[in-house]
Amino acid sequence: SFILCFLSGTVYLDHAGATLFPQSQLTSFTNDLMENVYGNPHSQNISSKLTHETVEHVRYRILAHFHTSSEDYSVIFTAGSTAALKLVAEAFPWVSPGPECSGSRFCYLTDSHTSVVGMRKVTTAMNVTSIPVRPEDMRLAERRAAAASDPDCQLPHLFCYPAQSNFSGTRYPLSWIGEVKAGRMCPVSVPGKWFVLLDAASYVSTSPLDLSVHQADFVPLSFYKLFGFPTGLGALLVNNRVAPLLRKTYFGGGTAAAYLAGEDFYIPRSSVAERFEDGTISFLDVIALKHGFDALERLTGGMENIKQHTFTLAQYTYTALSALRYPDGAPVVRIYSDSEFSSPEEQGPIINFNVLDHSGNIIGYSQVDKMASLYNIHVRTGCFCNTGACQRHLGISDEMVKKHLQAGHVCGDDVDLIDGQPTGSVRISFGYMSTVEDAQAFLRFIIAMQLHQSDGQPLPQTMPAEAGAPSESEAQDAIPAIMDGCSSSPQEDAPIASGVCSDLPSTVGAADLHSPLPMTTGTQHTPLERAAGVLDGGLGPYVITNLYLYPIKSCAAFEVTTWPLGNQGLLYDRSWMVVNHNGVCLSQKQEPRLCLIQPFIDLQQKVMVLKAKGMEPIEVPLEEDGEQAQIYQSKVCADRVNTYNCGEKISSWLSRFFGRPCQLIKQSSKFQRSAKKQGKDQPAGTTASLSLVNEAQYLLINRSSVLELQQQLNASDENGKEELFPMKDLISRFRANIITNGTRAFEEEKWDEISIGSLRFQVSGPCHRCQMICIDQQTGQRNQNVFQKLSERRERKVNFGVYLMHMSLDLSSPRFLSVGSQVCPVLKENAECPDLPASD
C-alpha cells in the first residue's frame, strides 16, 4: 500500500521538512500495538522485556541501515537531531583556556542548521572559543595541505558540518570527515586533535550513508525526515572510540547503576545508550521505526534507489525552472544553488528559489506560498532555520538581519520583504514517493502564476528536452512498487510439500553415531583428585539418566541416548530460534505454544523435521547455504548474534501454526558468540563459545531435586488422590540437557566441576528460574504452583539446576555424551559433604 489515499490531488513538496508515511507503515504499526503489550522497558515483567528486546533490535536495524554495527557505534535515542546536538555540546570534553593551554575550539560551517549554531552558547559558557567557517574557506583548506600538527597534543576540538544543506541541498564532501580527523585538513590552524560531527538529518532522508567508510565521531538524526512517522524521535550515533571521552552531569531515571539520595554518590550504567538516555525513552515510537524500515525497503528497494529517483526529479525540475523566461527573456525565478544539479553526489533533491516579476523584482515568499495553496501545492518558505545559508545566498548582511529584527521580522513569520529586499525564499524538496506529475504540477503552477498561461496548457515544448525529463515509466521504475495504489494484498503462500518423513524416531541410536562413551571407572578419577572435595566412590555412582537437546529455542525437547558434542555444547542445541515480525526472539513467556512444536534431527540426512498437531511435518536443512544465506543481526540475552533466515516455507508454516507472522532463524556457523564468564583452564586469549542459550553451554539437573519438588507439589493437592506432576513431565519443565540421578536434593549446587569419561565440565553457577517452569511442556498450559513452591523451598532464590561449561574441550576426534555414563563430581572448596540419604 502507498501514501494516504486522501492525498490524491495534493502536491506535497516539503519532504526536507518532513516526509510522508505510507498507509501500510501505519497499519503495520497499529496492528503491532493491537497484538502485543509493550510495557515500560525499565520494568522486569514480560511485556517490559518484550519492549526492551524490540528496542534493542531497532538499534541494530538503525546501525545496519548505515552499514555499521554496535561494535563501532552506539545509538542514543533522543527527542530529535536538535536534542542530539545539545547532548554533544554538553558532553564533549571541552578544555577551557589556561596559562599554558589555548583551549578547545568549536568550529561549525556557516551553512548549518540553527541547532548546530546554537551549540556555541554551551561552549561560550565553558569559555571555549566558537569559530564559524565559510564553505568557501573549507574548500580552500581542502585544496591545500594542512601544516603538520604536534602529534603529542591531544587538545580536543570539534568541527560540525552538514552532509547536506537543508537550505539549498548542497552536499558537502563526506571525505572531509577523514581529512579533518587525520589532521590533513583543518577548519582553523591550532594544535590538537579534531573530532567531527556530521549533521546527517537532511542528507539521510534521501541518500545512503556508509559509516563504515565515513566514520564520523557523532551523527545526529531525526527519523521523521526519513519515515514521516514517528515524529519527535531522533538519535545520536556515537563512535565507540569517542564514547569514553564524553562527560555527563545530570542523571535521570534508568541511567544509574547505583546512587544515593542523601550523599553525592552516583555510578552510571556501563553502556553508552543507558548512560545518556535519561528517563524512559519513547519506546512505542522506537518500535514504530521498525515498521518504517520495513515499508521503506519494501516500497523502494533501498536508499540508493531513493537517491537516484529523487535526484532525477530535482534535476528535471531545476532545469525546467531555470529555462522559464518572460517574453523579453528575463528569468521567472532566481535559484539559490552551489551546483548545476549535475550529480547526486553534489546536490540533493532540494531547490531553493524566489519568484521574480517582469522587472526582476522579487515577489515575497508569503505571496508565493498563498498562491501555491490555491493549487493545493505544499511548499516551505522562510530561512529554514539556516540563517547562515540564507544570508550567503540572498546577500543579507549581519546589519540587515538586525535591521529586519528592528522592523518587526522574526524567524518563521510572513514578513517576506523589507525595503524591497527578501528576508527569505521558497523551497521545494522531493521524497521517495514524489512523482513526475508532482514536478510538472509545480511547474504548471509557476507558469500559470507568472506567465499567465492556462493551467490546462501543456508545458513548453523545449523544456522537457532541455531538462532530460524522465519518462513516466523510467521514473516509476526508479522506485519499485511505489505506485501500487492505496492497498495491496499479499499473495497466497505456496503449499508446503508433504513428502516429509513423519516417522523419525525420537532418539538416535548409538549405531548411527559411532559407539557410545564407555562407562567411567575409578581410574578415571585421577585427574580430579587434586581437588580437596573428591566424592567418596562408596556413596554410589552418579549417572546420566536422560539426555535432551532443544534444537529450537523454547520449542520441545529432542531426547537422545547418545549425541555428539560441538564447541558450543550438544551439537545443534539451541541453534535455531523463532522470532516475531519485529525480529525479536519468541519464548514460551510470550508464546507458550512453542513447546508444542517437536523437532527431530536426522544427522545422516542432515535435516531437522518439525512436527505439530494439525500441521504437516516440514524439513529444515541443518546447515545454511553459504552462497544464499543473508546474514541478519539478532539479539539473545543482551548479546548480538549473526543469524540467517531459514526461508519463507518454514516461516509460512510457523505463521499458520501461531496465527501471526513468525520466522525461523539460525545462528550463523561463521559467528562466534562468546561467553561472558571466563572458564577455568580456559587458554589465554580465548573465550568459550555459546549457541542461542541464555547463559552456558549445558544445563544439568538432579532427579533428587525434582523428586523433592514433586513431593511438595503433590502434597499440596487437596484431593490427595491424583499425581498432578509426573516426574518426567516435571523434569521437562526445567529444560535441562543432562539429567542425573542423585543422592540429595540440590547437592549439585555444591559441585565445582564434573567429569564424564574424558570430558570435563566446570559448574559455572545455578540457573535462576523464571515463569517458564509454570508451563506444562506437553500442553502449553500454565500452572503457577510450580514457581510458587520452588520459591518457597529455595527461600525466594528460585534456583534450580546448574550451568556447565567445557573445560579444555578437544574436538580433534568426535566426542559424545551418552545415557548411562558415569558422572564424577568434585565439591567446591570448603563445601561440606553431609549425610546422604538413599538415592531415589
Image (cartoon, helix red, strand yellow):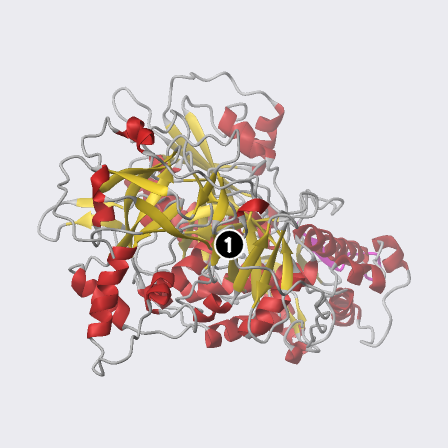
Left/right placement of residue 208 relative to residue 691 reads right
The residue identified by callout 1 is 551
Residue 478, percent from left and from top: 77, 57
Q: On the image, which quarter does residue 365 sit in?
A: bottom right
Q: Identity of the amino acid at label 1?
A: Pro
Residue 214, percent from left and from top: 57, 36
User: Closest to the observer: 612 or 254?
Assistant: 612
Which residue corresponds to the image point at 83% horizontal and 57% vertical from the top-left? 469
Q: On the image, which quarter does residue 422 sit in?
A: bottom right
Question: Compared with residue 243, is residue 169 higher up or lower down, i.e. above or below?
Answer: below
Which residue corresponds to the image point at 42% horizontal and 47% vertical from the top-left? 639
Left/right placement of residue 678 relative to residue 340 reads left
User: Closest to the observer: 26 or 608?
Assistant: 608
Give the secondary structure at mark 1.
loop
User: Closest to the observer: 738 or 173?
Assistant: 738
Q: Residues within 10 Å of mark 1 (few under 14, many from 20)?
A: many
Seen from this angle, which residue lies furthest bottom? Answer: 719
Seen from this angle, which residue lies furthest left? Answer: 262
Q: In which quarter of the image is the N terminus?
A: bottom right
Q: In which quarter of the image is the C terminus?
A: bottom left
Viewer can see residue 418: no
| Main secondary-structure element of the magenta-colored stretch | loop
Left/right placement of residue 670 relative to residue 54 reads right
Question: Compared with residue 225, is residue 271 higher up or lower down, i.e. above or below?
Answer: above
Residue 423 colored in magenta in the image: no
Left/right placement of residue 540 relative to residue 237 reads left
Q: Which contiguous range is marked in magenta?
A: 326-336
Which residue corresponds to the image point at 63% horizontal and 56% vertical from the top-left? 620
Viewer can see residue 345: yes
Residue 335 colored in magenta in the image: yes
Residue 367, percent from left and from top: 62, 70
Which residue corresponds to the image point at 42% horizontal and 66% vertical from the top-left? 588
